[in-house]
Image (tube, helix red, strand yellow):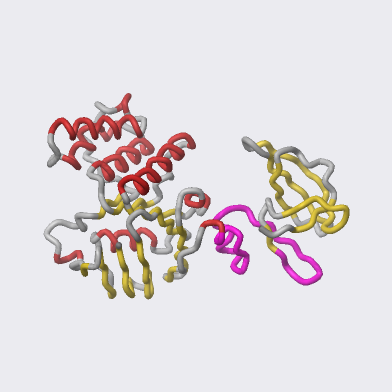
Amino acid sequence: MILLKNIELFYEKPILRGINLQVKRGEILGLVGKSGAGKSSLLKICAGLIDASAGEVFIAGKKQMPARHLLVPGYPSIAIVNQDFKLDPFHTVAENIKEAILHWPLAKRDQRVQKLIQLFGLKEISQTKAHLISGGEQQRVAIARAIADQPAYLLLDEPFGHLDANLRQRLSSYLMDLRDTEDTGIVLVSHEGQDVLGLCDHICILQNGKISKKYLPETLYYRYSAPEKARLFGPLNTIKLADGLTHFRPDEYQQSSKGIALHFERAVFVGGFYHNYFRTTNQERILLYAFEPLQQLSHIEIKRK
């Protein structure tokens, strides 16, 4: 288990304040926050790449040395993929992956490299030098290299940023396999909550230098006490009723003969279902999910999940 105790980070102003966090083996944890919230800095502290201003890092119950005291930056049991990738630009894709496991037996090493090349769709560029491939391709190579040596913990900073939908799905599937078969603890950092909802066992929010408790994805998605946080994870309707402002997700409704009156504007097919857009009598725009266009819908009631 990675355990962070009372982590503080200050530069010209406080970045992280009183961070306490546990990451278990076999857990996928999402860390969500707006750009500049300190997510990347927290990952680097976890990995032993930078020092916290205060606090302690424990791995498997053992207190870790500050980064400044390490001969080689980073803790051996933790792999991290930053947004800058740090590939060797004049080595090929295959060579970049292989560099992470040069200590493996030759046959096993080559087998592992080929498996990762296949997994991440890198076969056609496997012999291309890294400086000649695109940003999205470089990201895929960086992730493949990070998991090559089967680390106990894998930290990923915005891992889905340059991937198309197909590769996002393949990466998500492989990360879940890592969790289930190798007991890998994984931390995913994202400013888009929807990137982590369907993948993570638990999610934390980092805001104003402080971290929330761990939430189950479903609990966090349907939590409206903090609308600003809720919108990190998908659309949230806000309308004014007699008792004040009410928030609800696009799937939290049922058709009714009375209730909230709506005027249909349009339906947009998004693959498997429709986004239906309406306006209320107060001209508030709302979004409803359905498997078909809802032109005939005139009234709804909010139905909480």
Numbered label tally: 0
**Where's the C terminus, which quadrant?**
bottom right
Q: Is residue 95 above or below residue 286?
A: above
Work out which residue is located at the far right of the displayed protein and give it: 257
Work out which residue is located at the far front of the displayed protein and give it: 181
Image quarter for residue 138? top left
Image quarter for residue 300? bottom right
From the viewer's perspective, tell me whether residue 285 is left or right of residue 192.
right
At horizontal 68% and vertical 52% (from top left) the residue drawn is 250
Q: Does the segment drawn in magenta span residue 226? A: yes
Q: Is residue 225 above or below residue 200?
A: below
At horizontal 19% and vertical 55% (from top left) the residue drawn is 76
At horizontal 56% and vertical 57% (from top left) the residue drawn is 218
Residue 145 position, x and y percent, is 26, 41
Residue 28 position, x and y percent, is 40, 54
Q: Does the segment drawn in magenta span residue 164? A: no
- Is residue 47 or residue 85 the one in the foreground? 47
- Is residue 116 or residue 236 the one in the foreground? 116
Does residue 295 appear in the picture of this structure? yes
Which span of residues is magenta-colored? 219-246
Residue 216 position, x and y percent, is 50, 60
From the viewer's perspective, tell me whether residue 23 is left or right of residue 129.
right
**Where's the N terminus, which quadrant?**
bottom left
From the viewer's perspective, tell me whether residue 254 is left or right of residue 275.
right
At horizontal 80% and vertical 45% (from top left) the residue drawn is 264
Residue 65 position, x and y percent, is 18, 67
Does residue 14 appear in the picture of this structure? no
